[in-house]
Image (tube, coloured by chain):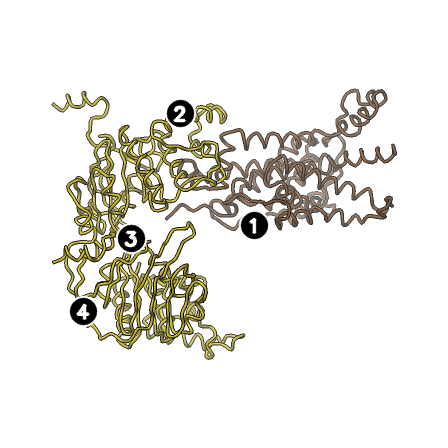
Amino acid sequence: MNADISKQNGGSKSPFAVEIKNINKSFGSVHANHEISLNVSLGTIHGIIGENGAGKSTLMSILYGFYKPDSGEIKVHGKAAYFKQPLDALKLGIGMVHQHFMLVPNFTALENIVLGAEGKTGLNKGLQNARKKLEELKQAYGLEVELDSVTEDLPVGIQQRIEILKALYRGARVLILDEPTGVLTPQETDQLFEILLALKSEGVTILLITHKLHEVMAITDEVSVMRQGKMVGNTLTKHTTPEMLAEQMVGRSVLVNTKYELQSIGKVVLSVNKLGVVDKRGFDSLKNATFDLHAGEILGVAGIAGNGQSELLSVLSGITLPNAGSFKIEEYLFDAKKNPSPRLMRELGVSHVPEDRQAEGLVLQFQAFESVILGYENNQKLGSGFLTKPDNIQEYCSQLQESFDVRPQNPRLYSSQFSGGNQQKLVLSREISSVPKILLVGQPTRGVDIGAIEFIHETLINMRNSGCAILLVSVELEEILTLSDRILVINSGEIMGIVPRITATKSMLGKMMAGIPFEDAKEDKK
Amino acid sequence: MTDFWFQFLLALDSTLRVATPLIFCAMAGIFSERSGIIDISLEGKMLMAAFVAAAVAYGTGSPWIGAFAAITVSIIASLIHGFACIIHRGNQVISGLAINILASGLTVIIGIALFRQGGQTPTLPKTSRFNSLELPLADVFEKNIPILGVIYKELISGHNILVWAAIISVGITYYILFKTTFGLRLRAVGEKPEAIDSAGISVTKMRFQAIIIAGILCGLAGVYLSTATGAGFVKEMTAGKGYIALAAMIFGKWRPVPALFACLLFGFLEAVAARVQGVEIMLIGEISSDLLIALPYLLTVILLAGFIGGVTPPRAIGQPYIKER
């Protein structure tokens, strides 16, 4: 019986293009992929969704031969495959379109496609042969690319087509696309989807990694959901809804967290009105944001990474300028014309714990006592404006390290020599010791060990209890639910709604994070 | 008038001689820097090669064996550079500087130890050198064909084989860079090494190949200095030519043919500088030869400041390649 099927299907015996069985992969103590199994049917578009850090990219990197799994097996077109490097995957017909393109900017499209696969005929002949083959591919899949134009002059959407052509030219029959629409305009996205459908109709299998639910619904045949390194769902797309997927992505459990008492809210200290930010590509990364922040509350900003949270923080801390709207602190109104600056914001009592502590929070090559006064070096006790007072600063740093339990307690140690948690405590201690009225916090516990997380949470709650207004940005929903008094959910730069913590549930927030407005998400709750 | 014409021809003739090591080094620089490796050690490699060429040619009596040894040593210097900054991702400028310092010290010390002549090698007899080749019929042409005959005799004929090799190396460099698969990959690795890596080609291997070629070319430049135009090695005989070549390469925007013209221009300025010293020129008066010698650097600075069109160096230059995570 089996033999008959294999005869009918010609060469390929398996109905699956890719079979993944019990894959495990750990990075240190992080179990990025836990017993992952996945079957991808031949000639389908298979979506893989999950929050940031759910393990999607790790899984794809394993499939593409970039990482070696700790255990488990992979079959490609029914044959067991062992990848030592991306080239091995390529030989079995697996091609990857990276999120950040692997193209030489000043090469022509043709040169980029051919690079590394020039053939043995010499460059000129190789390019000629490639041109012929590429014209066919272009026709077959509607991949319109001007082969002789210089890559860097082309729009991103076209550059992505070059990447796709590059994979097809090397004979890819399974195409992995990693967050392909992240850099595209809506029109380019539509064009990409047309191309993907054309590829599918020619029998190419496509794996689409994304966290955008409407894309999954629009184009995939089957969808797998990952959460915290595990495969938690696998259905035909037509049998599911965005709501169901959202729930699977963030988990169903309703969290009733009474760990920290709610507090009575004080007066408004920060008032944001229709704030908008336009990024370098001309897209609105923050649109029409309106909300108030009160003294003595933690307003949590929930959302999948890259949905405008970072822009919100950098505008409010005075680093970037708003393009539209305004925000008001005390009597000071800031908008596109009246520019804030980080220094002025500090003087107004706004402290900022940046999302990336290593790039923005610390100078890694500085000793702890130097890092701990960054931005506050004008403090009279620490320097006289021109000269610093190293003894005072070291003494000051020791005090901070003691009260914030930074280990090892040594002001002379380089910032890079502290662990992630202790680096974070250093930054936090610096920003909190100025006794801010408003504290902007980005990802306070990313990559921080459990003990330090506890300490950081306690610190934030204490700040709140003493009347500080805190804006907390975190991609950890758990953290938002634990700490916030109110939760603001953001998607594609737009605020989906603001929910008091007592009435919030994980599934409701998950839907809002996926772009479903508060009203609709609420009805479903019950 | 005929005297001026003749002087001009002689200046062009010596331009070629002066430009030869510049051309070799500029091509070496193009190979190295197009692959993403800054190469300020052109000077040092050339100096080492000059010393080894003279010393070995003196010992063996054969300029060819000398040349072979010189190229080998220059390649070894390249490999040291590569070991430091490709394998161990060291700073490319510092590594190059180290090679230059090493070369200027080592050549003198070994020179004194071997020959006891204050760091020089003994003067090479004619048989141990690359000599000028008179092209056939040069004298006949000069007498019978006006103008062209003189040009043939004074400018084209009478150079040694390395001058021709330098000119040819420009064509070869152009061909390799733009017409071969190797060249395509070489240019890619200096612009976006990730692209090369994801295509399954080793970035490390590409870069080593590039700097080995650079080593060969620097070696030839050194050989030319001590066993073709010179008759032996003299302490610090490269006298900054490696840096001028680097300037010419930048002036030529990392492209072989424009770099050749930059080398010729810089060579011409130097050749003229030697001739105009103390000579009154009509309407202008006496030109300072120092000014002429400084011109290449001035021009390069002006170019780099963006006055003569934009200059984009290879994008990945100076950055060690680190695979993500």
Kind of residue indicated by mark 3: Gly
Q: Secondary structure at mark 4?
A: loop
Mark found first going from the N terminus, 4 or 3: 3
Which residue bears the numbered disc 4?
A: A259
Q: Are marks 2 and 4 on the same chain?
A: yes
Real-space CA distance between mark 1 and mark 3, rounded to the nearest whole angstrom: 36 Å
Vertical placement of residue B139 versus B228, above or below: above
Rendered image quadrant of residue B262: top right
Q: Which chain is brown?
A: B
In the image, which disc is placed on residue A133? Answer: 2
Of badges 2 and 4, the one in the foreground is: 2
Q: Residue at x 56, y 35 (%)?
A: B213
Q: Are marks 1 and 2 on the same chain?
A: no
The chain to which mark 3 is attached is: A
Q: Secondary structure at mark 1?
A: helix
Dot 1, crowdedness within 10 Å: few (<14), some or many (≥20)? some
- Asked whether disc 4 touches disc 3, contact meaning CB atoms under 8 Å apart, the reply is no
Q: Which color was chain A given? A: yellow
Q: Residue at x 49, y 25 (%)?
A: A122
Q: Is residue A233 left or right of residue B296?
A: left
Q: Is residue A504 left or right of residue B232?
A: left
Q: Position of residue B64 (x, y in %)?
A: 66, 30
Kind of residue indicated by mark 4: Lys
Real-space CA distance between mark 2 and mark 4, rounded to the nearest whole angstrom: 64 Å
Which residue bears the numbered disc 3?
A: A28
Real-space CA distance between mark 2 and mark 3, rounded to the nearest whole angstrom: 45 Å
Dot 4, crowdedness within 10 Å: few (<14), some or many (≥20)? few
- Residue A327 appears in the figure: yes
Which residue bears the numbered disc 1?
A: B93
- The outermost residue toward the bottom is A381
Kind of residue indicated by mark 2: Lys
Which quadrant does the N terminus of chain B fall into?
top right
